[in-house]
Amino acid sequence: MQEKAVKPDIILEMGAILQHDAESYAIAPHIPGGFIDVAAFKKLVEVAEKYKAAALKLTAGQRIAVIGIREEDLEAVWRDLDMPIGYAIGLCVRMVKFCPGTTYCRYGKQDAMGLGIKLDELYHGYPLPAKFKIGVSGCENGCAAPLVKEIGLRGTPGGWTLTAGGTCGAKPRFGDLIAEGLNDDEAEDMVARIIRFFESCDWAKRIRLGRVIDKMGPEEFKKAILVQ
């Protein structure tokens, strides 16, 4: 079968991902932290049924992907859902993954939901030289996998521990320790500094933050973000 030409506007504006059949698409509405109220969840199911989606998929990015949407239905699906696009593709902050923290989890040491939602509001979809992920875990169990995110935050009784440069994929890398004992405001400020630094790295097009740190060295990276 000849591969179908993918329209750039379909990918960028509608967050649609061409599927293996080269004909249908998957979309992933944004669901911060994976928390969705009953009414929104019901609507998601109803829209998937209306447009004869092939499946619903719970993703690693705390989204619910709707799989098997026809190209001609994409605009109508988004209109009926009335939900923001989840940036599962593109050179941007693709996710701010966070756990229930002290809101619901008995192991929580810090408010992962509070900080996670704030970071999500600030940075989800924020354009950067390469794809970028943030993980916020309320305790050192690390359920949001912070050590393999570009920015990782783990809650301890003494505050937040922040790591940078983590990644999964074909060449996994644990994040480097950047700071410990941060309060919420300090953690937010450090995240902003790292993102501003990476945003300024024009030479790092499509190079993940961890590889940037490898090139310059962890200590030089720490110095660079402190002057941001």
Image (spheres, rainbow, N blue to C red):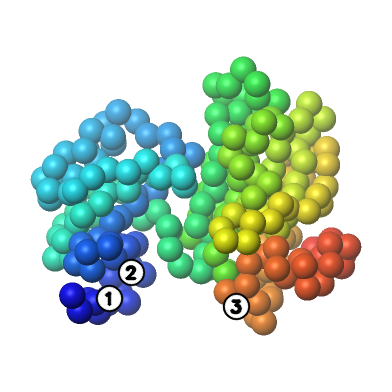
Please say if the residues under marks 1 and 2 sit with CB atoms less than 8 Å apart: yes
Q: Nearer the viewer, residue 82 or 21?
A: 21
Quadrant containing the N terminus in the rendered view? bottom left
C-alpha separation, residue under disc 1 versus residue under disc 3: 22 Å
Q: Specify the amino acid type for callout 1.
A: Val
Q: Which numbered tag is attached to residue 6?
A: 1
**Percent from the top left, x then y, of residue 73?**
15, 60
- Residue 205: mark: 3
Q: Earlier in the sequence, mark 2 or mark 3?
A: 2
The quadrant holding residue 137 is top right
Q: Residue at x 43, y 57 (%)?
A: 88
Badge 2 amino acid: Ile
Question: Residue 182 got which mark?
Answer: none
Residue bearing mark 2: 11
- The residue mark sitting in front, 1 or 2, is 1
**In the rendered structure, which disc, 1 or 3, sits on the residue that comes first in sequence?**
1
